[in-house]
Image (cartoon, rainbow, N blue to C red):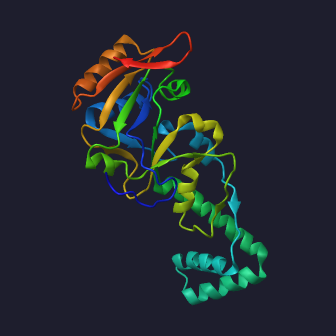
């Protein structure tokens, strides 16, 4: 097992298997993305602007303006706004003198610049971030209803360990934290937006805690879209309790083409308790 490294968020390694709930709906691109996972080893990294493939909690969070904090020392504010002006072509000594005058003597103009800073980070996120989401759980009723087309879809298990290439693929996976305390974004202390973006993506409201989510968040070194994952990384494919016979036959064909092939399992309802049971498929 690879050595643990320090990183923002939760430093723990992910559990041995992470799960991804998938729809087989024929409208939109859901079915296409699901087929590519099983037949072409492709997972889709979404952009915050790509609502067709993005979790509902992030649609709500990123569609509104995050709460901003402008608490910083005057020297931090001067350095930040000086760098912004230099990036626009100003000579540094001229920019520094102008910003110093503004920070100390023109609060109204400073407030306008702070709003521009907020917008700068806000636009940075959809232009530079891509996200892939997983869950620790495979038998949560809400997850099946929300992300697997009301039990008509499937859930795919991915091994996070057992081979160096699996561990490498998940090396940037972080556990999501759940809290009711909204942390403001400080545009001076994290001016590039990367730290703020990670904070936004790895904190969710406590009402989402049942998802037990892990996320891979990358600042856009590579474009939004599909990413090839290692062969053999899929450990199982779980059929939803309400999957149609036609869709089941199609999924079985896809799975048969996958290296291994992965084990096929099935969700069944336990009448006495209402729990979802994972049984051999």
Which residue is at a point 47% across and 46% down the rendered structure image? 215
| x and y, in percent, of residue 202 in the image | 54, 50
| x and y, in percent, of residue 240 in the image | 43, 19
| x and y, in percent, of residue 109 in the image | 74, 74
Residue 36 visible in the current orientation: no
Is 24 on the left-hand or right-hand side of 206? left
- Identify whether 73 is placed above or below 219: below
Report the number of discs. 0
Which residue is at a point 66% across and 52% down the rendered structure image? 65
Residue 127 visible in the current orientation: yes
Which residue is at a point 21% across and 32% down the rendered structure image? 259
| x and y, in percent, of residue 80 in the image | 60, 75
Which residue is at a point 68% across and 85% down the rendered structure image? 100
Residue in the foreground of this view, choosing between 58 and 1: 1
Residue in the foreground of this view, choosing between 189 and 49: 189
The image quarter in which residue 230 lies: top left
- Identify whether 111 is placed above or below 82: above
Instruction: State which quarter of the image contains the C terminus.
Output: top left
The image quarter in which residue 30 lies: top left
Residue in the foreground of this view, choosing between 13 and 248: 13
- Identify whether 278 is placed above or below 168: above
């Amino acid at each position: 097992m690879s050595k643990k490294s320090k990183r923002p968020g939760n430093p723990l390694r992910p559990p041995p298997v992470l799960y991804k709930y998938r729809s087989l709906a024929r409208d939109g691109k859901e079915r296409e993305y699901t087929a590519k996972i099983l037949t072409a080893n492709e997972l889709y990294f979404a952009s915050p602007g790509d609502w067709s493939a993005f979790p509902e909690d992030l649609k709500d969070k990123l569609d509104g303006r995050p709460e901003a904090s402008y608490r910083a020392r005057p020297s931090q504010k001067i350095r930040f706004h000086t760098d912004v002006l230099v990036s626009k072509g100003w000579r540094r000594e001229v920019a520094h003198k102008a910003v110093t005058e503004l920070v100390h003597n023109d609060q109204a103009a400073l407030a306008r610049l702070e709003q521009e800073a907020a917008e700068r980070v806000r636009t940075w996120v959809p232009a530079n971030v891509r996200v892939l989401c997983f869950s620790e759980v495979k038998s949560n009723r809400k997850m099946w209803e929300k992300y697997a087309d009301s039990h008509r879809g499937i859930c795919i298990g991915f091994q996070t360990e057992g081979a160096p290439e699996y561990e490498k693929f998940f090396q940037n996976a972080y556990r999501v934290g759940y809290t009711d305390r909204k942390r403001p974004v400080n545009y001076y202390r994290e001016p590039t937006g990367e730290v703020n973006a990670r904070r936004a993506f790895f904190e969710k409201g406590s009402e989402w805690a049942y998802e037990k989510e892990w996320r891979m968040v990358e600042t856009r070194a590579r474009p939004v879209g599909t990413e090839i994952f290692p062969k053999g990384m899929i450990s199982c494919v779980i059929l939803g309790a309400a999957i149609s016979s036609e869709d089941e036959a199609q999924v079985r064909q896809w799975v048969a083409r996958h290296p291994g092939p992965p084990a096929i399992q099935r969700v069944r309802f336990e009448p006495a308790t209402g729990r979802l049971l994972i049984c051999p498929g």
